[in-house]
Amino acid sequence: MEEAIVYFIFIVLLIGGSYYQIRENPATMTVGTYGVFIVLFLSLGVLYFGQFDRLVWYRFGSCVGALAVIFGLLLLFSMSWYSWKKSRDYLTFMAASIYTVALIVTSYWQVMRWTLAWLLFYFVWQFMRFLISSLVYSVVTKAPKQGPIVVLGGGLVDGYKIGKIVDARIRAAVTDAKLMSIYPIIIFSGGQGEDELVSEAKAMRDWAVLTYQVPISKTRLEDKSRNTYQNIKYSNQLLKNQAFTFYTSDYHVFRAVLLAQKQNVQAQGRGGDVVWRYRMTAFLREFAGVMSLNKWRHLCLASAWILIAWLINYL
C-alpha cells in the first residue's frame, strides 16, 4: 500500500511539473523530459503492480533493449546523413560506421557490448524528448488572435510551382488569418535557390493571391533567406522585432521555434498538415537538426553517458 502511495505521488509530481512547464514555456525539450519519465514510470507501474513474474520482466527488458539498439542505429545514421547533406561532412558518417563495426565486433565482450550500446540509448532518449516536446507544442499552441503572420518557404516544384507541402503551410496561415477581426499582414519568406526560377516568397505570394484570394495589399515579401534560421531572422527584421506567428509544416514547427528562441525572436509556430507516411522520415531529419543546434553539448553528454555506462558494467 505504501509503495502504491509513493508511486502515485511521484506520478502526480511529474504531471504537475510538466503542466507548469507547458504553461511557462512549451517550446523547450524539458517538456519532453517530463513526458518520457511519465511514460516510463507508467509502464513500470503496470509491470510492477500487475505482479508479473521475472520472466515477463526479462522479456520486456530484452525487447525494449533490442528495439532501442535498432532504432538508435537508425537515428545515428540519419544524423550522419543530415550532417553530410548539410555540410558534406563525411567524418560523421565514417565515425558512425566505425562505431557500428565496433558494436558488432565487441558483441561477445559483455562489458564493451553494453557500454557501446548505451550510446544508442542516449540517442533514443533524446529523440523521445524531441518527439514528445514537438507533439505537445503543436497541441497547446493556439491560433493567433492578431497578426502579423509569416509563411516559411519550403522549395518549389520544377523551379516555380507550389507543391502540396508548401500549399498546406499557406492554407493554414490563410485559415487563421480569416478568423481575425482585422486581416493581418502576411509575410512570405523564402529566397531563390540555384535551381529555382523565382524566389519562394514571390511564388507563395502569387499562389496565395490566386488560390486563396489573399489581398495583395496585405502581403510582404522576404526574399533573401536561404534556410529556416534566416527565415526567422529576416522576417523579424522586416517586422522590426514585432511578435509574430510563423507557419510551416507540422513536423518542422518545433525546430523552427527553437531557432527563434536562439535569436531572441518573439514568435510562435503553427503547422500545416502533412501526410502521415512522410512524417516519420521528416521527424528523423528534424531531430538531426535539433541535435545539431547544440552538438558540442550533446557530444559531452554522450561521452559522459558512455563513461558512466562503462563504470557500471565494469564494476
Image (tube, rainbow, N blue to C red):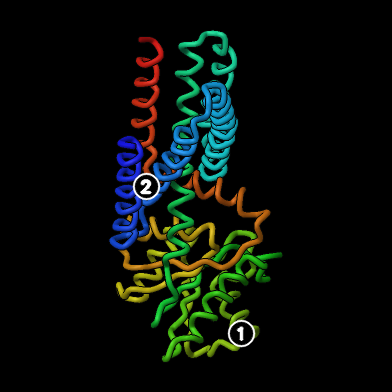
Residue at the (36%, 70%) spot, across then down: 236
Q: Is residue 174 above or below residue 273?
A: below
User: Which quarter of the picture shows residue 39?
Assistant: top left
Q: Which mark is residue 34?
A: 2
Residue at the (36%, 68%) spot, across then down: 267
Looking at the rendered structure, the kind of residue marked 2 is Tyr
Q: Nearer the viewer, residue 47 or 298?
A: 47
Residue at the (55%, 87%) spot, across then down: 214
Circle 1 crowding by C-alpha within 10 Å: few under 14, some 14–19, many from 20: few
User: Which quarter of the picture shows residue 60?
Assistant: top right
Looking at the rendered structure, the kind of residue marked 1 is Tyr
Q: Which mark is residue 41?
A: none
Q: Position of residue 167 (x, y in %)?
A: 62, 72
Q: Which mark is residue 212?
A: 1
Q: Position of residue 127 (x, y in %)?
A: 48, 42
Residue 223 in sight: no
Secondary-structure class at tag 2:
helix
Q: In the shown orientation, is residue 243 left or right of residue 217?
A: left
